Amino acid sequence: MLTTTELKSVTKKNGWQFDWRYELKQPEREVYKLTIPNAIAVIQGLISIEIKSDHIYMHLVESASFNKGKSKVYAGVPGNLVAFACRLSFQRGFEGNVSFVSKKQLIDYYTKTLGAMHFGGHIMISDTPAA
């Protein structure tokens, strides 16, 4: 999990788009970081989730700035964070069910890459087979 101490490096000045301080302050949300074994102090990506009654809801997923674009250091950071949310869903007895809100232009992308289903509006669901 992300700690308040680590928030000092997770700022817009350091290339992060979202307000992770806000996410960490929300009592119903859990913020997790992705690191690699040989550089555990370097945050590769972040995810903010909420445990619902029957699934995991993903509020935000973000790669570090150096993991975005054509010259990214590591590919697959968002996919690994979503896979983590699916794993938590299985561990909590939710059969891998995860939901999130997508930007309209990314609905087809998430359908193809994550196997997520478009539920309506901007709501996406990843069910057991996709998880």
Image (tube, rainbow, N blue to C red):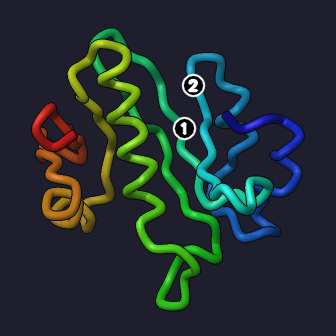
The residue located at (65%, 17%) in the rendering is 27
- The extreme bottom residue here reads 71
Q: Alpha-carbon neighbours of circle 1 within 10 Å: few (<14), some, or many (≥20)?
A: many
What amino acid is at disc 1?
Ser
Q: Residue at x 15, y 32 (%)?
A: 128
Which of the two residues, 92 or 8, is positioned nearer the viewer here? 92
For the residue labelled by badge 1, is the local secondary structure a helix, a strand or a loop? Answer: strand
Q: Residue 61 in the image: x percent, y percent?
A: 49, 51
Q: CA distance from mark 2 to mark 1?
A: 6 Å
Asked if disc 2 and disc 1 are in contact, CB closer than 8 Å, the reply is yes
The residue tagged with tag 2: helix, strand or loop?
strand
Q: Residue at x 75, y 41 (%)?
A: 21
Find disc 2 in the rendering and name its residue.
Answer: 29
Identify the image quadrant of residue 63: bottom right
- What x and y, as percent, mark residue 23? 65, 36
Quadrant of the drawing holding the C terminus: top left
* Mark found first going from the N terminus, 2 or 1: 2
Quarter holding the N terminus is: top right
Position of residue 107 in the picture relative to residue 102 (left or right)? left
Residue found at the very far top of the displayed protein: 53
Tell me: residue 60, above or below residue 65. above
- Percent across and percent down for residue 99 are 29, 35
Above or below residue 14? Residue 51 is: above
Q: Which mark is residue 48?
A: 1
Instruction: Give the amino acid at mark 2.
Output: Arg
Tag 2: Cα neighbours inside 10 Å, few (<14), some, or many (≥20)? some
